[in-house]
Image: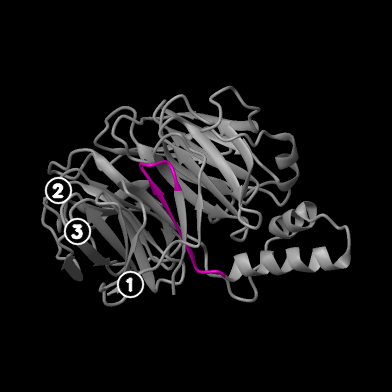
């Protein structure tokens, strides 16, 4: 285990605890959102805000991007909003930080709004639809899962841009008590829409959609935790996932084969690996895109980094004085990964006074894309940036 040095930078400007973080646009942008409903988009080249607005009237539970052109936010006001935020839109938005003033700001254009359930602090999860969702002229269609507005112990799935509720009350037929869902992950595995859910009871359950019958089956169930699941994340290929809890346990779960089906009687499979960290209350678990490491945000103000393979603790990041609630990794890109939107953003934000200035800006953009940055958000309203492995 390595005790890490100081953060490479600290973003200051929120006046409330940080609840959500997300890198996007080839790691050139970081969006942070807080307990008062404010969202801030940071330019990671200049490390200054490029957009600041109050996204919700309550705390923000989660945030993501949609094809680099929109920001999706989920608030305690029972709303999911989709905000248009293309590279060219940033120039028309306010940049005064919430800590400086709580007055109204210009909002990005609101594209979509969903009425959802936010009573149990469980953030939304989204994934891109794999077929037939959109034409070539617009953004890809997405599926969004949230706790059900009809039965808060189950889960609903919505479709955007249509706004239709596609699936209702997933988990209602489990046959045992789980309590409310606390963490969700929606993904496609082998072209099948699948949902990983962590529950108040400590259960981790995987549901899969049978497209021919339009019915959900339970393909995996495990109960590694004695306390509510706080967070979970899975590998990009969906072969395994990790869960953390209010207890001190972190568990790794292997996805079952395609022909496996777990009975809904409450029988539980053991996770493939379990570690007792001896540190209760690790939340915000996030796996880096290469799967080599994952990180957690601790109630004890520490950010801990673990090996994805051995699950050994490899670093402890200590700077914040108050509890940490969320972490996010910059994506690891290979040389073939590019984004037309991120390239456009780089071109728009560079002041082309001379070739020398352009070269420096391009170098910074390239460094951001290749960096192994971990962001952490704390109760103190600050976002720390760390270089890790």
Distance from label 2 to label 3 (Cα)? Answer: 22 Å
Q: Secondary structure at mark 2?
A: loop
The part of the chain drawn in magenta is 371-382
Quadrant where the C terminus sits is bottom left
In the rendered image, residue 189, in percent from the top left (x then y), is placed at 41, 62
Q: How is the image coloured?
A: one colour
In the rendered image, residue 56, in percent from the top left (x then y), is placed at 48, 28
Q: Secondary structure at mark 1?
A: loop
- In the visual, does 191 lie left or right of 362? left
Q: Is residue 326 above or below residue 155?
A: below
Quadrant where the N terminus sits is bottom left
Q: Residue at x 19, y 49 (%)?
A: 246
In the rendered image, residue 89, in percent from the top left (x then y), is placed at 73, 40
Asked where in the image residue 91 lies, by quadrant, the reply is: top right
Q: Residues within 10 Å of mark 1 (few under 14, many from 20)?
A: many
**Residue reaching furthest to the right:** 354
- Name the residue tied to disc 2: 227
Q: Residues within 10 Å of mark 2 (few under 14, many from 20)?
A: many
Q: Residue at x 53, y 33 (%)?
A: 81
Q: Residues within 10 Å of mark 3 (few under 14, many from 20)?
A: some
Q: Is residue 331 above or below residue 210?
A: below
Q: Earlier in the sequence, mark 1 or mark 2?
A: 2
- Name the residue tied to disc 3: 262
Whether 380 is among the magenta residues is: yes
- Viewer-nearest residue: 9 or 312: 9
- Name the residue tied to disc 1: 308
Q: Residue at x 22, y 46 (%)?
A: 199
Q: Earlier in the sequence, mark 1 or mark 3?
A: 3
């Amino acid at each position: 285990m390595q005790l890490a040095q100081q953060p490479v930078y600290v973003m200051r400007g929120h006046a409330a605890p940080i609840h959500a973080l997300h890198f996007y646009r080839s790691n050139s942008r970081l969006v942070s959102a807080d307990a008062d409903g404010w969202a801030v988009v940071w330019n990671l080249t200049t490390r200054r805000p490029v957009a600041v607005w109050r996204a919700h009237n309550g705390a923000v539970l989660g945030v993501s991007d949609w094809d680099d052109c929109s920001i999706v936010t989920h608030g305690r006001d029972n709303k999911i909003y989709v905000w248009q935020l293309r590279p060219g839109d940033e120039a028309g938005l306010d940049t005064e930080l919430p800590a400086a003033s709580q007055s109204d700001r210009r909002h990005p254009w609101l594209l979509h709004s969903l009425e959802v359930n936010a009573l149990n602090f469980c953030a939304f999860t989204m994934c891109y639809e794999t077929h037939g969702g959109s034409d070539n002229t617009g953004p890809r269609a997405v599926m969004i899962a949230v706790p059900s507005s009809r039965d808060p112990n189950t889960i609903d799935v919505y479709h955007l841009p249509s706004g239709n509720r596609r699936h209702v009350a997933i988990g209602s037929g489990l046959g045992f008590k789980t309590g409310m869902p606390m963490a969700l992950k929606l993904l496609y595995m082998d072209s099948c829409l699948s949902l990983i859910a962590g529950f108040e009871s400590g259960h981790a359950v995987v549901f899969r959609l049978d497209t021919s019958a339009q019915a959900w089956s339970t393909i995996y169930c495990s109960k590694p935790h004695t306390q509510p699941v706080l967070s979970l994340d899975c590998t990009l290929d969906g072969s395994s996932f990790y869960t953390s809890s209010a207890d001190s346990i972190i568990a790794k779960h292997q996805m079952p084969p395609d022909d496996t089906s777990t009975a809904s009687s409450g029988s539980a499979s053991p996770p493939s690996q379990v570690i007792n960290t001896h540190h209760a209350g690790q939340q915000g678990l996030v796996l880096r895109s290469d799967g080599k490491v994952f990180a957690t945000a601790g109630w004890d103000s520490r950010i801990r980094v673990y090996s994805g393979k051995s699950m050994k603790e490899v670093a402890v990041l200590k700077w914040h004085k108050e509890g940490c609630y969320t972490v996010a990794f910059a994506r690891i890109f290979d040389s073939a990964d590019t984004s037309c939107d991120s390239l456009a953003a780089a071109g728009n934000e560079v002041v082309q006074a001379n070739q020398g200035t352009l070269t420096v800006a391009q170098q910074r953009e390239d460094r951001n894309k290749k960096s192994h940055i971990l962001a952490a958000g704390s109760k103190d309203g600050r976002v720390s940036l760390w270089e890790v492995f």
